Amino acid sequence: MANEPTRIMLGVNESTIKGYPHPSISSRKAFEWTLQKIVRSNTSGFKLQFLHVQVPDEDGFDDMDSVYASPEDFKNLKNRDRARGLHLLEFFVDRCHAIGVACEAWIKRGDAKEVICREVKRVQPDLLVVGCRGLGPFQRVFVGTVSEFCVKHAECPVITIKRSAEETPQDPVDD
Amino acid sequence: MANEPTRIMLGVNESTIKGYPHPSISSRKAFEWTLQKIVRSNTSGFKLQFLHVQVPDEDGFDDMDSVYASPEDFKNLKNRDRARGLHLLEFFVDRCHAIGVACEAWIKRGDAKEVICREVKRVQPDLLVVGCRGLGPFQRVFVGTVSEFCVKHAECPVITIKRSAEETPQDPVDD
């Protein structure tokens, strides 16, 4: 059996619920599931690769009250996004470090589903794990455009981990 | 971390290429991938559950030259199907036994995609692995109705393992 670890890429994103940059429920769920069900005690057998895709804030909702008066302002905006992304990745890297699982993490900008598939092509992981909102208790429409796209187009096996009903916030569109 | 092994259900079927009941290319691929990339050296951490769904032979193609003259003939037919299914499962159980991975295997009859989802509901594995034909070198249509259905409807995470191009037989509809 080969000695290189199994490389598992995880697409992770921020929660939509609060402004504070903590991982979404479905990202955390996908991560915990991977550790419990796949990695288990075999910490040297796996390497986790965390990819966070930042979506350019097209409608500028978060920045409604901001005033852009100079190129410097835009630079500050980019730095702020970068800091949020780093903070998010730190959560996952810290956990891996604590339990002794090798990992790496990086940030890309663009459309999440397309960037994830492009990064799979480039990095060639053995497996891609993506979380998705799944079905909330009062919801009939499946919320998983990113995961559905990746299952179809990513050039490696893909596992979709759905949030469970009890992990779903009051408004199932939140994550 | 829990001590119970991670239970991985694998849907396995016969090859369509020859009459002899050996596993399909995609079933074997899904099995080998699971051992190499997930189980690895942690043989006590996993239990494999092989489900073979026999599709009732509606058009009777295999039995074109058979003559059914008594109830006994139908019983013989059922016994023959059963023997083929057992032979198929024996392949996987033997391999698991040889490398020391716990397993169990069983046969059900019916529509593969529906039976697999029903068995997931009943057995509640941690993960379902299904092979699929994927894209052949000269083929544009995705051949994976069972896997696509399971990804959407099975009540557990699902991995679809595609055959690679070099494993695809001349006629990509074969498996």
Image (cartoon, coloured by chain):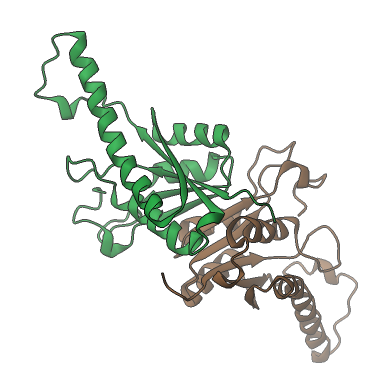
Chain colours: A green, B brown
Question: At 43% across and 36% down in the image, what residue appears?
Answer: A113
Front one among B77 and A169: A169
Q: In which quarter of the image is the N terminus of chain A?
A: bottom right
Left/right of residue B12 with respect to residue B81 in the rendered view:
left
The picture quadrant where one finds residue A64 is top left
The picture quadrant where one finds residue B69 is bottom right
Percent x, y of residue B84 = 79, 75
Question: At 50% across and 57% down in the image, what residue appears?
Answer: A43
Question: At 75% across and 74% down in the image, what residue appears?
Answer: B94
Front one among B151 and B60: B151
Front one among A88 and B88: A88
Image position of A133 with respect to B58: above or below: above
Image position of A104 with respect to B68: above or below: above
Image position of B70 with respect to B41: above or below: below
Percent x, y of residue B166 = 77, 42
Left/right of residue B107 with respect to residue B61 in the rendered view:
left
Report if residue A141 is visible in the image: no
Image position of B12 with respect to A49: above or below: below
Label tally: 0
Left/right of residue B1 with respect to residue B60 in the rendered view:
left
Report the residue that reaches farthest toward the top: A70
Percent x, y of residue B5 = 51, 73
Report the residue that reaches farthest toward the right: B65
Report the residue that reaches farthest toward the left: A65
Report if residue A55 is visible in the image: yes
